[in-house]
Image: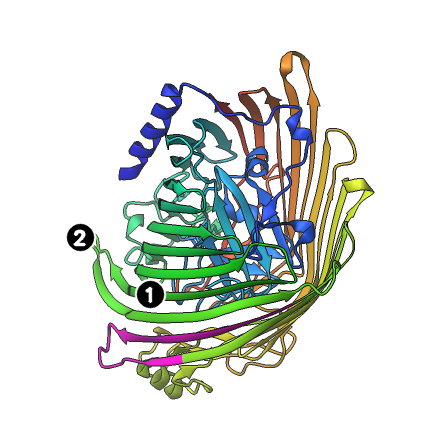
Amino acid sequence: MRHRRFAIALLLSALLLSPTSFAQESAGDDEAIEEIIVTALKRGTGTTLLNTPLAVSAIGGNELEDRGISSAFEAFALAPGVSVAEVGGQGGGLSIRGVAGALGDTPIGYYLDDLPFTRIGQNVAPDLNPYDLDRIEVLRGPQGTLFGLGSAGGTVRIITRRPDPTGFEAKATAAWSATGGGGDNYRLQGAVNVPILEDRIALRVVGSSVEQGGFIDRPLEDNDDFNEDDDASWRAKLLIEPVENFSAVASYWHSENTTHNRFANEDLERRAALFLTNPLTFGADFTQPTVSRGGEWAVSNNEFDLFGLVLEYEADSYRITSSTSYLEYESLQLYDDFVVGIFSLLFDVETFAQEINVASVQEGAFDWVLGGIYLENDMYSDSRFGLLFPGAQDPFFVPVGGTESSVEQWAVFGEVSYNFSESWALTLGGRYASDERGSVSNLDPSDTPSGKFDKFTGRANLAWRPTDDTLLYFNFAQAYRAGGFNTRLAIATAVANGVEGVLPAVEPDEVTTYEIGAKFGLLEGDLDLELTAYVLDWKNNQIFMQYVDRVVNPGVITAHNQNAASVDGKGVDVAVNYRGIEGLTLGLTANISDTEYASDVPGAGIEKGDAFFQAADLTLSALAGYRRPLARGLQLSVLGTVSHITEREDRALAGVFRSDKTTLVNARAGVEADKWSLFVTAENLFDEDGAVSQFVAFIPSGGEPIRPWPRTIGVEVNVTL
């Protein structure tokens, strides 16, 4: 990994050469709860969570590091109703309030700072290291009138710390841990802020290197802990403020990882019949059965580079923000299946996006925000199948699918709020979006489906503040996703097999939500309470159908896209934070929901009332933290967290897969000083090993359960200079 050594060397050099230090929160500071200002409304200088009339959650960068969170997915799941279905090394599929994507563009917007991270037609989001962040924001429900991506289910924002031209800063974290029944794990991360020209120019660089030792054995090849993961990333931001009311931030984010599967079978018999299609078993003893934690394997290599430029100009009454980004993403995945041999899947994606926002900055009778986005996406995908026979040096791969796709999108959007008294405000918003896309099949270049989609969607929000510590609101919001296509071969194969309802075009789907929310600051600010009840209606939901072809190419897996029934959902979000006892912090977030199909879907095995894809009835996250001063300026810090999620359903070729309900408990305890801290950490303390999601590689063996990392105990050291 060519960037890793550079990133680590740069960070360590900066730490060793630093002449000054920056202030870390001291023992006394920790008892003052960090007040987070969010910019979800895109106007003014931001608002507190209590004063934001939307279902939005946020966690600050200091709290992320205090909790020892090293995964963006773990941070997202702290918000009510957010869950992640891991789909292999390339990332995971996000679900907010049961809205998740089995097909088409992701319904969840994903932003790195003000830069959209999107791959058209892909529902997978990267799991990034949340080190040295300003905050993470999660907005639940459609957000098309505020953000360029126009997300149907919600938006997540990873907001990094801004370079500081007033002083030098540096910090580093090193961690080691051991996984039960597995290998050792290592994590090194650091950040450095360098002022180049006082008050005008600064550079901030952040890097991390993570090695996971693995815990799954392959007894057929006498290979223990083979599912090692290797992840390296670094990012840089250059801030230039030539005058008081203008700033330019150039950024670069690089990430690369190699991961192995975390799906595992409990029992596996060695069978000589596997020899031809599972070449790695060559030379193994096939005479004895064995208990295994691993059958097939999958290796995923993923890399992306994100370049960004954000320009901001602020006048007396308005602010203009321009965000330009270019994303290069590559993913190569290899799957070894007992039935069909080796399968490879390649994605090569390039995305250009330009987003502009103009927003009011002064409080008055009217607040407003206007925006526009232009986005181009080109994707090349290629899938191949191959066998490796004894004595062969390389597998013989045969193309079995793939496309070259292009998408051009643009949208204009905005909101206007009228504050018709000190306590009442009405907001109306709208969005008009146009989407033109097409593709060429690798197997049949004459098959070039294309089309254009456009739609207007809106939002209405009524907010009432009866007291300074109470906010009540009603919110109505809409969003839509562009449709797609089926190839001629997919349609012909479906007709030959008697599959009904397969059309050349897949229509757009649309999500409409109605919600009532209440936010309270109680007990003189010691207790925060947020309650939200919502109903959602998802029309023309897009699904991906797989089946075994019994006519055209007997025994071959084939698939097509189609619109399913509508999906109905309802639920309640809850968030509580209490800090009324000195040194003690308690928190709870939860979502109770019911998201299901509103009617039968012929041919898909879906009946009215079936649970929607990856929708959980209950998600819950709780924490308890305690800090107490010790002698000699030290402070004791203890933190425990619990996360729980109920069963979820996934429908694939293997039939209905139902994940296990899982409860994960993490804990950390240690001492903190002014410039260093030392912790003992425990993840998955009670060794939960139930299936949390399913891995399906378009293979006739169906899906395999993905399991959480086993109990992991370690040590973490944090240093500032």
Q: Is residue 352 left or right of residue 27?
A: left
Quarter that holds the N terminus: top left
Q: Compare marks 2 and 1 and give the one earlier in the sequence.
A: 1
Q: Is residue 416 left or right of residue 575?
A: left
**Where's residue 12, x and y in %?**
36, 25
Residue 198 magenta-highlighted: no
Q: Is residue 506 left or right of residue 79?
A: left
Q: Which residue is mark 2?
A: 392
Give the residue at x 74% y 62%: 421
Give the residue at x 43% y 84%: 502
* Quarter of the figure with residue 96: bottom right
Q: Relative to residue 652, is residue 137 depicted above or below? A: above
Q: Which mark is residue 377?
A: 1
Residue 524 appears anywhere in the view = yes
Report, in whole angstroms, how far the alpha carbon at label 2 lies from the one at label 1.
39 Å
Which dot, 2 or 1, sits closer to the camera?
A: 1
Q: Relative to residue 440, is residue 646 depicted above or below? A: above
> Which of the two residues, 337 or 96, is positioned nearer the viewer here?
96
Residue 226 appears anywhere in the view = no
**Where's residue 232, x and y in %?**
37, 39
Residue type, mark 2 in image: Ala
> Which of the two residues, 625 or 441, is positioned nearer the viewer here?
625
Give the residue at x 76% y 29%: 582
Regarding mark 1 in the picture, which secondary structure is present there?
strand
Residue 444 magenta-highlighted: yes
Q: Relative to residue 187, is residue 295 depicted above or below? A: below
Residue type, mark 1 in image: Asn
Residue range of the region highlighted in magenta in the rendering: 427-452
Q: How many residues crowd around disc 1 within 10 Å: few (fewer than 14), some, or many (20 or more)?
A: many
Give the residue at x 24% y 67%: 399
**Where's residue 371, x and y in %?**
47, 64
> Which of the two residues, 526 or 714, is positioned nearer the viewer here?
526
